[in-house]
Image (cartoon, rainbow, N blue to C red):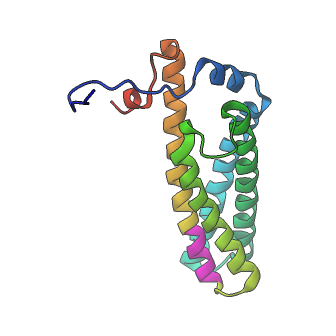
Amino acid sequence: MTHHPTEKTPHRPLYTPEERRRRDETPWTLVQGILAPLQFVVFLFSLYFVLRYLATGEGAVIATGSIVVKTLVLYTIMITGSIWEKVVFGRYLFAHAFFWEDVFSMLVLALHTAYLAALFTGFVDTRGQMLIALAAYATYIINAAQFLIKLRAARLQGSRGGVEAGTLAEVAE
């Protein structure tokens, strides 16, 4: 059988009925629902302190502390998110529905960890550390957008009644 570009290819839904059931039953879904907005609030405060430091040279201690807190919240959401993914999809990372989000999350983690390494080793001065944090924050925003798109896809799938509806291709249209 050959595939013609004009033919509509069936798309895998974001969740199978069993995955949806596991998602809805696990307490890790609520944990993620609490941690995600908390992380965003922490991010906003930290971003303010980092930008203030870069603009004025003042507030290095509070900016540094806020980045460390943001990074710890990120680690927490990544660990609990991996547990959630294992419960729902049977694997800790790179499940079919969240493969690219997980790939990009690795970059987010790497940059936040690079910040901590720069902070604790003193290899980079405070300004350089803040610039690493900004790069980490830029990747975090992209990754958060990826997850919001998936949340929208899940809601569309749920409102259309399951397996035949709510595929990622439909969300993009």
| Viewer-closest of 171 and 59 | 171
Q: Residue furthest front?
A: 1
| Viewer-closest of 115 and 66 | 115
Residue 143 picture location, percent across and down: 54, 50
| Viewer-closest of 70 and 120 | 120
- Name the residue located 55 percent from the left edge and 53 percent from the top edge: 103
In the displayed structure image, the side of residue 26 where residue 100 appears, left or right: left
- Report which quarter residue 118 is drawn in: bottom right
Residue 50 picture location, percent across and down: 61, 69
Residue 7 picture location, percent across and down: 24, 25
| Viewer-closest of 136 and 61 | 136
- Name the residue located 74 percent from the left edge and 31 percent from the top edge: 30
* Position of 52 relative to 160 (above/below): below
- Name the residue located 73 percent from the left edge and 56 percent from the top edge: 75
- Report which quarter residue 35 is drawn in: top right
Looking at the rendered image, the quarter that the C terminus falls into is: top left
In the displayed structure image, the side of residue 170 where residue 136 appears, left or right: right
Q: Can residue 144 be seen in this view?
A: no
- Name the residue located 51 percent from the left edge and 47 percent from the top edge: 100
- Magenta-span inclusion, residue 87: no
Residue 27 picture location, percent across and down: 79, 29
Q: Is the magenta stretch mostly helix, strand or loop?
A: helix
**Number of numbered discs visible in the structure rendering:** 0
The part of the chain drawn in magenta is: 126-134
